[in-house]
Image: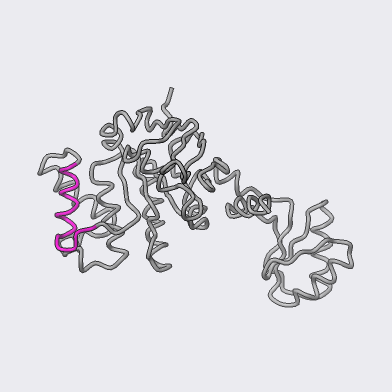
Amino acid sequence: MPVSLIVTDALTKTYGGRVTALSDLTVTVEPGVIGLVGANGAGKSTFIKIMLGLLAPSSGSVRVFDIDPTVNPDQVRARVGYMPEHDSLPPDVSAAEFVTHLGRISGLPRTAARERASEALRHVGLYEERYRQIGGYSTGMKQRVKLAQALVHDPDLLLLDEPTNGLDPAGRDAMLALIHRIGTEFGISVVVCSHLLGEVERICDSLIAIEGGRLLRADRISEMTAASDVLAVEVSEGTDALAEALTKLGLTVAREDRLLLVPLESDAAYDRILQAVADLELPLHRLDQRRHHVAELFATKETADV
């Protein structure tokens, strides 16, 4: 039987007996590109550190590749690459030196470490800049160095903690494309820890959502973003007039920015909307079933707590 990527059972971590970072977390994670999402302080980084054997759980258990990181952390780290959230790079050495050094720490012979470092830096787009000192790098380049050092020992799993931190929109897009390529073309499973839900939706196959250290949901992204029983209607002008016309036709209409949201109670809803748009001679940009978003998980939780 194939071994699951990560398995936890009632995993709990408290600090000083007062602050609970993880509470009774039970989840099974299969290989792929996985999003680990939640607000800052939700327990994501604590979960990663426990998986690496850097922190011991207060109770419960975790296994990575069926290995207990609290008992055999070296075995786990030999198969896992870790990209930390915060900048921890030495400014006065080159990327090639730094990534080679991390390869040596991982157990690679000197020549193999140099070769693997060059290959990893090529994969992340820093091959031409590999001999420059890291202190002269931009934020985006530093993020890529951190990704390269996580790749250098050819891991089976990458744990990426907020990989787009500090990047502008273009830099975030480039980093997300790179992560997606690693997960789909290199055959390496990736856990992307992020509080930016839209980014996770774009590149991940499945998702673990936690809030206050507790599991909200673990599922495939396709299941979480399935089409809803609501039609989304968008016109470039005349939105108010269209909303009024649809209401007169007996349809319930809600607004979300430029969208009109109409419950799909029957196939007749399509016909009524199209007829109203035609009667008002409006340019129709969108008419389809609205898809759920990952963010709705947290909105539903907040509503339930009120």
Q: Is residue 104 above or below residue 137?
A: above
Query: Percent from the top left, x then y, of residue 6?
Result: 42, 34
Viewer-nearest residue: 48 or 225? 48
Q: Residue furthest front?
A: 17
* Residue at horizontal 42 percent and vertical 26 percent from the top: 2
Query: Percent from the top left, x then y, of residue 38?
Result: 51, 51
Q: In the rendered structure, does residue 101 fall within the stretch colored magenta?
A: yes
Q: In the rendered structure, does residue 220 fall within the stretch colored magenta?
A: no
Q: Is residue 98 above or below residue 243?
A: above
Q: Is residue 286 above or below residue 306?
A: below
Image quarter where the N terminus lies is: top left
Q: Residue furthest left?
A: 110
Q: Which colour assignment does the render follow? A: one colour
Left or right placement of residue 101 versus residue 230 in this view: left
Query: Percent from the top left, x then y, of residue 255?
Result: 73, 67
Question: Main structural element of the magenta stretch: helix, strand or loop?
Answer: helix
Left or right placement of residue 292 versus residue 67 in this view: right
- Give residue 246's quadrant in the image: bottom right
Viewer-nearest residue: 286 or 27? 27
Q: Is residue 45 above or below residue 156?
A: below
Image quarter where the C terminus lies is: bottom right
Query: Percent from the top left, x then y, of residue 212?
Result: 53, 48
* Residue at horizontal 60 percent and vertical 52 percent from the top: 298
Q: Which residues are magenta?
A: 89-105
Q: Residue furthest top?
A: 1
* Residue at horizontal 41 percent and vertical 43 percent from the top: 16
